[in-house]
Image: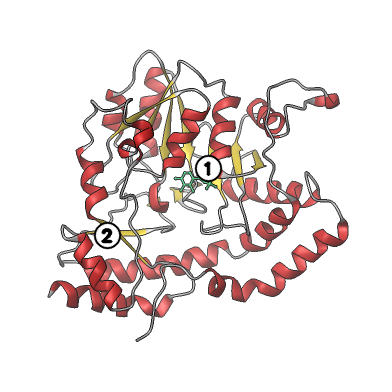
Amino acid sequence: MSFIPYRDLLAEMAPLADEIDQAVYSVLRRNRFILGPELESFEKEWSTYCGVRHAIGVGSGLSAIEILLKAYGIGPGDEVIVPAYTFIGTWLGVTSVGAIPVAVDVDKRTSNIDPGAAEAAVTNRTAAILLVHLFGCPAPVASLREVAARYGILLLEDACQAHGASVGKKRCGSLADGAAFSFYPTKNLGALGDAGAVTVDSDEIASKVRTLRNYGFGPGNRIIETGTNSRLDEIQAAVLRVKLRHLDANNEIRRKVAFSYLHALEGTDFTVPETPNDAEPVWHIFSIRHPDRDAVRTGLKRHGVETRVYYGEPPHESRIYAQIIKSRKLPITNELAETSLALPCHPAMCDRAPFIVRSLLAITGN
Ligand SMILES: *Cc1c(COP(=O)(O)O)cnc(C)c1O
């Protein structure tokens, strides 16, 4: 029996191996490893791709969130509204600058933050809404922007799963007051280690982010902020430049896989994700729902298909947040945590989707 892994990074990398080898060797020969020409070029290319004035490379996605919040002066005493159904990193970015994550529930159809719930959570301490383009599907940015404008608060993007996704003609990362990207190896644009970026239009915030990622050094090599060490290194930047050239093609393959799932699972016991009309997702994660999720998962495993669960323990269920939000009701997040199942969906598996669908239908007797 053949085994279908959830991801296969080696197979995804194979067509790019020569280009990546060359890129890495050219950095080694140049003998410049931090804050050099590869990073400068990548920052230009990534900002152009996203359609923003500035992209600033940092050490990880979590670090991008922290530094973006810090650059906007968000810290102790501030509340930041976050979706309950997300990766722990979204919340930790808020917590680690000393601010309070205020969890709101999500829309059952898209799994994305619910703008009505976000508005209901605004208080006079709210500094920002940190939306997440969950699973690579753009969040309802237009409604969230209205909420943010109404209360005079910031709207920030956790775009760590949404490289290349768009709303209308605008890419994720350019849709609000600033965005955080992760280039963790499994993301749609992934490095060969940890890496991330902040994208932003404001010259002032961009300059603050540059200062904060590099100890706090400002012009004239003087310390002007309490910064940190969070820089995207030259080798990772060189790798990302190669992989960026293939991002659109790879997203297109993911789209084909996703469409074949969507088409084949229509009218079955499985609930498939809905996409808003003006949104173009990039299917970082293709997650379906079934009331008997664990049985389906075991059944697929017997057919040789590896799956994942996002997110079985949402942040509010973890012990570190138990105290803060015990009182808040998050029924949809809890339901999604119990019923969601992510199927393999990546650029190296185009022809395996029909087999996976047949297995799903066989398991449930559809
Ligand atoms: C991956 C991810 C992060 C964190 O990125 P790292 O590079 O692992 O620090 C944050 N938020 C979301 C939604 C993510 O998917």
Foreground label between 1 and 2: 2
Q: In this view, does 314 lie to the left or right of 211?
A: left
Residue at image position (18%, 78%) is 362
Residue at image position (54%, 28%) is 69
Q: Where is residue 236 in the image (x, y as percent from the top left)?
A: 69, 55
Q: Is mark 1 within 8 Å of ligand 1?
A: no
Query: Which residue corresponds to mark 2?
Result: 288
Depicted 13 relative to depicted 221: above or below: below
Q: Residues within 10 Å of mark 2 (few under 14, many from 20)?
A: many
> Upstream in the sequence, badge 1 or badge 2?
1
Q: In this view, does 290 lie to the left or right of 14?
A: left
Q: In this view, does 130 lie to the left or right of 31?
A: left
Asked which secondary structure carries label 2, the reply is strand
Quadrant of the image occupied by residue 280:
bottom left
Residue type, numbered disc 2: Ile
Residue type, numbered disc 1: Gly
Q: Where is residue 39 in the image (x, y as percent from the top left)?
A: 74, 48
Asked which secondary structure carries label 1, the reply is loop
The answer to whether one can see residue 366 in this image is no
Depicted 240 relative to depicted 20: above or below: above
> Which dot marks residue 173?
1
Of residues 79 and 53, which is closer to you in this image?
79
Scheme of colours in the image: secondary structure
Q: How crowded is mark 1: few (under 14 residues within 10 Å), some or many (20 or more)?
A: many
